[in-house]
Amino acid sequence: MRTSLLNLISTPIPILNSLGLETAVGLSSEDPIGGRRAAEAFTAVASIYGADGRLTERRVLGEIPPRRRRMFDLTALTRPLVKDDHLVVAHRIPSRLLGEGSDLEAAVELDAGDADFAMYRSLVQYAYPGGSNGSVIYETPPSFNVARPGRAPASTLTFTSKVTVSEEIETALALIHYSMDPAYARTARYSYALFAPDGEQVGGGAVTVAPFTVGVVRVRAALRPGTVARYTSADDGLAWFGYVGYSTDAALIPLILTLGPGRGTVSVEHTHPAQAYTLPAKPEDKHKVKGRALALWAERLSGARGPGAAS
């Protein structure tokens, strides 16, 4: 099979300068499935995108020896280049496939087994300067946002109950818009809504996320005035909300960050979609159910805008 070296193992990572967070990525040469590639070394590469989604620079970070792990400071690497929120994509390439002067963007011919790097995930870590850190592990799904001739573009349906706000705590969602196709140019509109524990819709809005960028939803700004005080619990001082978001334009990877700036605390979640636990087993049936759910949410949320909405 013919594939790009950069797409063998890649993870798009939001650099969230607007939230005051520092970012690092942990990469391993260990096979997560086990029993394969015990002696494989990898070369780590970072693709740095600007706030407008244009590739700013591609840099070799170094080698990861066999059965080793390395942490790379992405804030130190990127802040001199980009001050706003943006994406960095971390790539791992088997060092044996790289010769002197190799073109990293070139496609190479590999057999199916040699190109299978499923489950090689990355650890993405966020922290306030001098504070504790929160981290999450994920990877890029195969053929992510690559055009499918004759088929509709990929879509997004996000559910989570892990949204909380208080005087000291806020929640933000980072929406990663990435593609394994370097010529990808589709802009995605993402609509969302927030719900109180009793089911009342208490906020919402929409953001437009350009390709190879990150969109940020700050929950407090998206809630109607007075909502936090109305739903704050006397027991713990927290207000909890449900969240639904969708896009019919593209697949977006959501990261949910619970932030305590005054305490220097960060918690990060890449929530497995709640609806996945109740979907049918057959892929074709899953697509039907997801499509129907998207249509229903789009109908319900059409025109719904909150105080933090942008377009």
Image (spheres, rainbow, N blue to C red):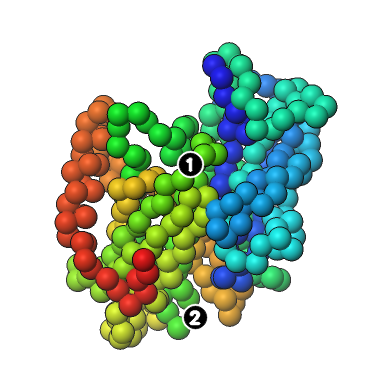
On screen, residue 292 above or below 169: above
Which label's residue is closer to the chain start, 2 or 1? Answer: 2
- Residue 63 makes an appearance in the image: yes
Which residue is outermost to the top? Answer: 111
User: At numbered mark 1, what does the secondary structure look like: helix, strand or loop?
Assistant: loop
Quadrant where the N terminus lies? top right
Which residue is disc 2 drawn over?
A: 168
Between residue 309 and residue 118, name the one nearer to us: 309
- Residue at x 69% of width, y 70% of height: 129
Residue type at numbered disc 2: Glu
Which residue is disc 1 drawn over?
A: 184
* Relative horizontal placement of residue 116, taking residue 229 as reference (left or right): right
* Relative horizontal placement of residue 12, taking residue 63 as reference (left or right): left
Observer-side mark, 2 or 1, equals 1
Real-space CA distance between mark 2 and mark 1, rounded to the nearest whole angstrom: 39 Å
Question: How busy is the neighbourhood of tag 2: few (under 14 within 10 Å), some, or many (20 plus)?
Answer: few
- Residue at x 38% of width, y 46% of height: 250
- Residue at x 52% of width, y 39% of height: 183
Residue type at numbered disc 1: Tyr
User: At numbered mark 2, what does the secondary structure look like: helix, strand or loop?
Assistant: loop
Question: How busy is the neighbourhood of tag 1: few (under 14 within 10 Å), some, or many (20 plus)?
Answer: some
Count of numbered badges drawn on the protein: 2
Quadrant where the C terminus lies? bottom left
